[in-house]
Amino acid sequence: MRTRPTMSEPETSGTHPGQPRPLRLRDALLRARIEAADRTGVVVDLRDAEVARLEILNDALDPLFAQVPEQIDLFDRGISQGDTPRLWIDVVAHIVMGRDKRLYRFVQDSRFGRIVLAESHDTAVIVEAVTDYVARRMIEREHAMVIPPEPKPAVAVPPRRSRLWPFVFGFILGAAALFGVAVLAALRSW
């Protein structure tokens, strides 16, 4: 005969005695998806396991994206169901499963190729990497949105005088003075 647990005893599930019962259905679904993904062996099931793991990660990212202000439209999160399922964070960054179908790989496409930002089997590590990425992208947006100060009017610089004309004028005066001295010396010697 089974007795009801008291306030001090944790309520347990019928399948695993001694294990605490999930507090939320979401936690139970998360565990069931992970268990199902771990047991799969068929190629189709592997793809479904990839999608299931990406959905788990997507659910783990919900609190982060709930904090992003609505006026910031940089991020378009969603899972694409192509040949290689991907969890898109924005236009250039996404999360894809590794070859073993358990490793999360957070990558960013750049003009120099694909850059791996983080890799881990642990969703918490990937959530932290995505959090850092989102913060950097928001700061980049702030810098891009800043209006630069109006340029100051240019101060009129006085025109630079040419040094050639004073030289030419001095040369002519010097030549005239020498000519005058030579004429005076010739007149006296006569």
Image (tube, rainbow, N blue to C red):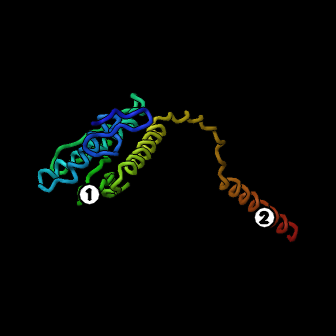
Q: Residue at x 34, y 45 (%)?
A: 19
- The x and y percentages for residue 184 are 84, 64
Q: Quadrant of the N terminus?
A: top left
Q: Nearer the viewer, residue 183 or 58?
A: 58
Q: Is residue 114 left or right of residue 176?
A: left
Q: Is 184 above or below relative to 136?
A: below
Q: Tag 2 or tag 1, which sits nearer the N-term?
A: 1
Q: Residue at x 67, y 54 (%)?
A: 163
Q: Quadrant of the C terminus?
A: bottom right
Q: Nearer the viewer, residue 168 or 78?
A: 78
Q: Residue at x 64, y 44 (%)?
A: 159
Q: What residue is disc 1 on?
A: 98
Furthest toward the bottom, the residue is 189
Q: Which mark is residue 178?
A: 2
Secondary element type, mark 2: helix
Q: Quadrant of residue 23?
A: top left
Q: The residue under label 2 is which amino acid type?
A: Leu
Q: How far, Cα to Cα, is label 1 from label 2?
A: 95 Å
Furthest toward the front, the residue is 1
